[in-house]
Image (cartoon, coloured by chain):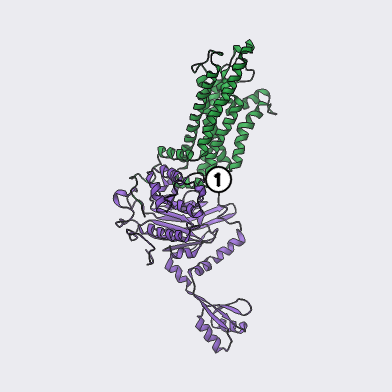
Amino acid sequence: MSTTCTTADTRSPAARPRWRDLIAAEWIKLTSLRSTPIVLGLLVPLYLYFAHGGAATTYADWPTLAAELKRHPDPAHDAFPFPKFLLLMATAGTLGAMTVAGEQASGLIRTTFIAVPARTRVLAAKAAVLAGTLAVVGLVIGVGVWGVTLATYGDRIPGFSYGTPGVARAVAGTAVMLAVCGLIGMALAAIIRNTAGTVFAVLVFFLAGPVAGKGRVPPLDADRSAHVTNALPGYAWGRLTVMDPGHTVERLPSVPTAWITLAAWAFAALAVMLPLLRRRDV
Amino acid sequence: MDRIPRAEPSTPAGGAEPYPGTEPPAPGGRATGRCDPYPPPGNLDGMIEIEHLTKRYGRVLAVDGLTFTVRPGRVTGFLGPNGAGKTSTLRMLLGLNTPTSGRATIDGRSFREFGTGLRHVGALLDANDVHDGRTANAHLGALARSNGLPRGRVREVLATVGLGDAGRRRIGGFSLGMRQRLGIAAALLGDPPVLLFDEPVNGLDPEGIRWARGLFRELAAEGRTVLVSSHLMGEMEHTADHLVVIGAGRLIADESLAAFAARATTGGVTVRTPDPTALAAVLAEAGATVRAHGPDTLSVTGPTAAEVNELAFTHRVMVHEVTAHGKTLEDAFMQLTADSVRYRAAATAAGAEGGAGR
């Protein structure tokens, strides 16, 4: 056999695999699928385009806008249009779901676990790579949509810059939100184990859920119903992008509550996914 | 080592003689000092031990109290009819499935206790356990990286399995034979002392089958533990030194190929006669086992063809044809596993192997 020298490794057989190796391996896996760069590459210009559309409308309407509305301008409304960002969340959730569902459906998960029997580490590395990648995409989108919005406003709607309070929060919130959506997608795939079923669940959770939540959830009164919908990652993120709640009539959670909600979703997703896949016959 | 002397198919120079587990390997073998990425031998001797292993999937008992040992330095064939529990056993050995009871260990450890699997055990379970969207390079590159193996290993193992030119191609376009080669390449990545192959020659062309046999023999000759499963006896005849045969999840035989071949010496005789009743009576009296095969044909076990002829002649029974059957390993295998196959067909028609935890 043409085996030649490999790296010397005299560590004990039970030595844990190194995090940097596992993360590098998951990075290769994520980026070697053509769909990943295509989807992520399309998302950024798409949301810059959406931001431009929203900001251009506001720019055009500004001279004729009622004074009351001019007193509470909220450029985040143009930069981060909520319904369009629901689609972004669903995309991130699907991407996350596919990292797990793709391995489960193809059987690659067996090859992966034969190579690294420490399943929890493999999955933690996978979650870290996915969450990190999506966070960077969220950061790029967040910074980008602000740039487009501010540039479109120009001199007509003054008083906003990257330094305006709330701008940085919206960017950070978007980065965290995309990462959390990816993790939720992974957890759904781990629970459901079936690719089509997982994608359906992701779409229901990220698209139908927030929309349905805006109506009254029948057995609950308006307050409780609002609590439930505010606990959804989409609305938690939405709260982080609201710069001036002056003219908002809805029930809004506090900003810290919104951050805690996103963190709780991330934690819950990992808490479900890691033990499930650690014990399961694959 | 009960190795059977045989013509080694195309073994390149440097294939060392098999050595018992803890002895230092012969020069040219696997552990050549500066290259050896493993802890010293003695620490790792590559012994696989299956102890009272049992796996139940719902109502199907896939593996039933299986106990055997696989030793280094030889190719062990792991045989059984479809659904006998071979894949279930390998999956439990590799920590993919949790046994209902019992243990499966490699060097005294359950596989899940190993940190980096590829350096200790190389395995090809199913050639389709890959993502079609990746190139062979990316697939193997990710596996190598997860175990801290250098990127260059990917090119080396691809060249070893004859896929040197296919590294940049997506696996989705690979034939089954190419996937088998890719799976073997993945198993070789970490240069492990223990190798497990589940039905590795399915889909390989004749040249590929010959190559795979040579590779398995070579790996064993380097002192590694090589376990190759198959449902075809003929396959093992040219590859294995030792056989572990299971049926319906139970151990049927665990012996050298030579011992197994010895089981096949009791050949049968087929006789065509216009008077089967009379001949059957004569043969039965002489101690033979006789079964009717159609209106004028008897199948006889016990006496040789010559003895059957003599008996017929002395008792004045007309015979038209007496044919002796030299028995093959295949026959011995069929005979041994016949009961378990029949049991399976009657009781667990769904099949334990196909339904196993996908």
- Is residue B107 visible to us here? no
Q: Kindly indicate the quadrant of the structure image that contains residue B13.
A: bottom left
Q: Kindly indicate the quadrant of the structure image that contains residue A228.
A: top right
Seen in the picture, residue B167 relative to B203 is either above or below; the reply is: above
Left or right: where does residue A52 sit relative to residue A118?
right
Residue at the location (58% across, 25% down)?
A: A50
Q: Which of these two is toward me, B246 or B87?
A: B87
Q: Kindly indicate the quadrant of the structure image that contains residue A60.
A: top right
Mark 1 nearby-residue class (10 Å; few <14, some 14–19, many ≥20):
some
- Is residue B353 visible to us here? yes
Q: Position of residue B122 (x, y in %)?
A: 42, 51
Q: Which of these two is toward me, A67 or A8?
A: A67
Residue lying at the far top in this picture: please name it: A67
Seen in the picture, residue B316 relative to A282 is either above or below; the reply is: below
Q: Which of these two is toward me, A266 or B219?
A: B219
Q: Which chain does tag 1 point to?
A: A
Residue lying at the far right in this picture: please name it: A218
Residue at the location (61% across, 41% down)?
A: A197
Colour of the chain lettered A: green
Q: Position of residue B283 (x, y in %)?
A: 56, 82
Count of number-bearing discs: 1
For label 1, the residue is: A105
Q: Which of these two is toward me, B73 or A150?
A: A150
Colour of the chain lettered B: purple
Q: Quadrant of the N terminus of chain B?
A: bottom left
Q: Position of residue A153 (x, y in %)?
A: 55, 17
- Secondary structure at badge 1 equals helix
